[in-house]
Amino acid sequence: MHQLTLAEIARGLADKKFSSEELTKVLLARIAQLDPQLNSFISLTEDLALQQAKAADARRANGESGALLGAPIAHKDLFCTQGIRTSCGSKMLDNFKAPYDATVVAKLAAAGTVTLGKTNMDEFAMGSANESSYYGPVKNPWNLECVPGGSSGGSAAAVAARLLPAATATDTGGSIRQPAAFTNLTGLKPTYGRVSRWGMIAYASSLDQGGPLARTAEDCAILLQGMAGFDPQDSTSIDEPVPDYSAGLNGSLQGLRIGVPKEYFSAGLDPRIADLVMASVEELKKLGAVVKEISLPNMQHAIPAYYVIAPAEASSNLSRFDGVRFGYRCEDPKNLEDLYKRSRGEGFGPEVQRRIMVGAYALSAGYYDAYYLKAQKIRRLIKNDFMAAFNEVDIILGPTTPNPAWKLGAKNNDPVSEYLEDVYTITANLAGLPGLSMPAGFVDGLPVGVQLLAPYFQEGRLLNVAHQYQQNTDWHTRTPTGF
Ligand code: GLN
């Protein structure tokens, strides 16, 4: 039963092949048995899950239907869940029980999902390896010596290991797409403003966006449907109608114009990944797509711009964690200043402290124009490159990551080498565009992802292209040995 996708679960529940309660029990037992190898969960919510499963079964018995009614999922541990620990992967919030549900959590619960638990993540979503979590690193089910990607590594490892069919995640600079690539999943970062950020603990507010992680594009469509939509409580939420994503999956790709940026194939890209990217292009050509080389000339500036903007916003967002109102407070503070300093010094891990220092420096008087303002100007140039490209093509295709998953610990003493791994994903966040990563092959037994980018609010186009690709390839069906 654990092999079922969300779409298959919906059919099984509708046909009364099994109940949500039965399925939930199977998955909870599987998590108890297998998760100690992976460390993909920070908290399990068994009682809530069984209660929600029974309620979903009762709703179905009363004639209700819906693709998510009775579907087991988990939330990345930065979505606030009322009365349940919401740690953000940090000692700072280890004792924090959210007083309310994030909009995403509330919407999915109303659609009838069953919450199995809260998944592990890089501390405050800062990282690309899920090694900065206060709760320890997550292991990649494809190779337990490798990282699963980050920061949504817990969601990715759990779904890849078939502990559950899908999970929520967030993406500030790649944290949905990169772990999807590293664990053979499909992951979608929506357009900025498509999914409410209310109750999603902020890392870099102008970049953060929640989205689905699942095995197939079909399942991402189902989960995104439950997450997307205008939220008056989030001032950056956009009041655009949400299309029926599942209904759009079978559109023809005849004449679809795919742009492949020449800058993507620079020296840093593993040539074996480059080959798999081009193989995916050939596959899409067979389905009627036409391919064109394009250029994104300002891409080289994306990493420096991102690693100014994201820490700057983080340093501001994280100033609320001061030992007074939320979370960790140091023992026996001598005075107020000591309380602030030691609560923050003891509560935040080294990567978070590094980012706060970089961000505070970039925002400080005298440096603001040189760093933050300059980075915002680069951001506009990057957006303009995309706008020009989308005048010529319908989607942009390339690698999700320059390399496959690396060994645990390999980059621990070299944060910049980890930052460089985000080269293909962060441009979509800087521009606010939607992006999807889908499985496209293997290198040394490790999964490789191909990234698709589309114009604003064209999530449906990304899902359509990925679904058609998945109807004609079987990479996404491969299962890691032992799971
Ligand atoms: N790896 C990037 C960072 O560390 C992106 C993380 C994310 O998307 N949350 O900032």
Image: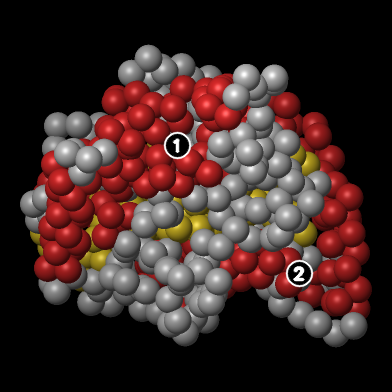
270 horizontally vs 135: left or right: left
Q: Secondary structure at mark 2?
A: loop
Which image quarter holds the C terminus? top right
Kindly tell me whether mark 1's CB lies below 8 Å from ligand 1.
yes
Question: In the image, is residue 462 above or below residue 199?
Answer: below
Cα distance in 3D space between marks 2 and 1: 31 Å
Query: What residue did someone put label 1 on?
Result: 126
Q: How is the image coloured?
A: secondary structure
The spot of residue 54 in percent (x, y) is 90, 64
Residue matched to label 2? 112
Q: Nearer the viewer, residue 244 or 110?
A: 110
Identify which amino acid the numbered label 2 is placed on: Gly
Given residues 12 and 126, the one toward you in this image is 126
Q: Residue at x 22, y 40 (%)?
A: 365
Q: Residue at x 76, y 80 (%)?
A: 65
Q: Tell me: residue 122, above or below residue 412.
A: below
In the displayed structure, does residue 119 sit left or right of residue 230? right
- 287 lies above or below 276: below
Q: Earlier in the sequence, mark 2 or mark 1?
A: 2
Whether residue 396 is visible to the viewer of this picture, yes or no, is yes
> Does residue 203 appear left or right of residue 50 in this picture?
left
The crowding category of the residue bearing disc 1, from other C-alpha atoms within 10 Å (few below 14, some 14 to 19, many at least 20), is: many
What residue sits 15% from the left and 54% below the top? 377
- Tag 1: amino acid: Met
What numbered label is drawn on residue 284?
A: none
The answer to which of 228 and 7 lies nearer the viewer is 228
Label 1: element kind: loop
